[in-house]
Image (cartoon, rainbow, N blue to C red):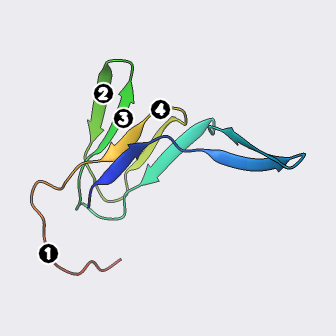
C-alpha cells in the first residue's frame, strides 16, 4: 500500500516540552521484491528506488519520502 510522504523524526521531552528533530540518517530494508517504489525528494529532484530483496537504502533523515503504489499488485500472502 502507498505510504504518505513524510520525514522521519525523533521526539524527546525536555523541561516538559517536546523537542522534534530529524535523525541524521533514515533507512529502508527491503524484505521482498514486491511493493511500490520508495520516492525520496530533495529540492526539485527525486529518486525512485524499487524494492529488491536484501537491498538496504540509506539517505539523509531530513528528506521527504514515501512509497508509491505497486505497479503489479500480487494479492498473495508474503512469506518472510
Residue located 32% across and 18% down the image:
44
Residue located 36% across and 77% down the image:
80
x and y, in percent, of residue 9 in the image: 60, 44
Look at mark 2 in the image and give the residue it sits on: 46
Answer with left or right where residue 11 lies relative to residue 78. Answer: right
Circle 3 residues within 10 Å: few <14, some 14–19, many ≥20: many
**What label sits on residue 31 in the rendered view?**
none
Q: As rendered, which of 16 and 79 lies closer to the eye?
A: 16
Tag 2's secondary structure?
A: strand
State how far apart marks 1 and 4 are (Cα).
31 Å
Residue 73 lies, with reference to residue 22, above or below; the image says below
Answer with left or right where residue 74 lies relative to residue 63. Answer: left
| Tag 3 and tag 4, C-beta contact below 8 Å | yes
Q: Earlier in the sequence, mark 3 or mark 4?
A: 3
State how far apart marks 2 and 3 are (Cα).
5 Å
Look at mark 3 in the image and give the residue it sits on: 40
State how far apart marks 3 and 1 are (Cα).
26 Å
Residue located 90% across and 45% down the image:
15
Look at mark 1 in the image and give the residue it sits on: 75
Amino acid at each position: 500500500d502507498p505510504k504518505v510522504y513524510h520525514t522521519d523524526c525523533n521526539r524527546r521531552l525536555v523541561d516538559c516540552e517536546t523537542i522534534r528533530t530529524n535523525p541524521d540518517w533514515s533507512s529502508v530494508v527491503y524484505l521482498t521484491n514486491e511493493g511500490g517504489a520508495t520516492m525520496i525528494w530533495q529540492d526539485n529532484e527525486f529518486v525512485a528506488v524499487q524494492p529488491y530483496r536484501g537491498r538496504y537504502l540509506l539517505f539523509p533523515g531530513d528528506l521527504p519520502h514515501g512509497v508509491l503504489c505497486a505497479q503489479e499488485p500480487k494479492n498473495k500472502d508474503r512469506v518472510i
